[in-house]
């Protein structure tokens, strides 16, 4: 019976390694993704790592710029949560999906 459990353990290790590869692929994909937020004449572009890449203020107010930043970041977070959640089968992994 002990040796039967080793087969289960090997299967679990393979699944964990596959999930790790999938997570790396998703993180790479997210780092290249671009998310845009617009409010008034302000436009902000961020990537999936939450880095601000572009800000176009036009005649937008500070309030418009802040709202555009928040919209872009919210979009990036939602996309990351969706992609990472699918990869983990919905498991909440602190620091990764939570």
Image: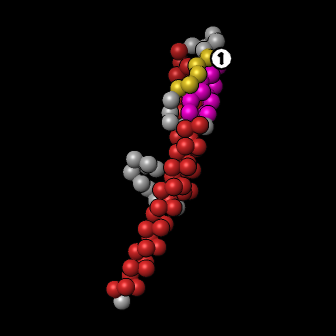
> Percent position (x, y) of residue 83?
57, 50
> Percent position (x, y) of residue 85?
52, 54
Q: Residue at x 46, y 50 (%)?
A: 97
Q: Residue at x 43, y 79 (%)?
A: 7
Would you identify the image quadrant in which residue 87 lies?
Answer: bottom right
Q: Residue at x 60, y 14 (%)?
A: 57
Label 1 crowd (10 A; few <14 / some 14-19 / many >=20): some
Q: Is residue 14 above or below residue 28?
A: below
Q: Which residues are magenta?
A: 34-47
Would residue 88 be seen by someone viewing this image from the given angle? no
* Residue identified by numbered label 1: 41
In reply to whether residue 87 is colored magenta, the answer given is no
Q: Residue at x 40, y 47 (%)?
A: 95
Name the element at disc 1.
Answer: loop
Q: Is residue 61 above or below residue 92?
A: above
Would residue 14 be seen by someone viewing this image from the given angle? yes
Front one among 86 and 39? 86
Give the residue furthest to the top.
59
> Percent position (x, y) of residue 58?
64, 12
């Amino acid at each position: 019976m002990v040796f039967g459990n080793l087969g289960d353990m090997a299967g679990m290790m393979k699944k964990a390694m596959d999930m790790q590869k999938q997570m790396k692929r998703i993180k790479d994909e997210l780092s290249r993704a671009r998310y845009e937020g617009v409010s008034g004449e302000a436009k902000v572009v961020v990537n999936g790592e939450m880095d601000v890449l572009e800000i176009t203020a036009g005649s937008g107010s500070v309030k418009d710029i802040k709202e555009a930043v928040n919209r872009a970041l919210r979009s990036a977070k939602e996309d990351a949560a969706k992609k990472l959640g699918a990869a983990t089968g919905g498991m909440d992994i602190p620091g990764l999906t939570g």
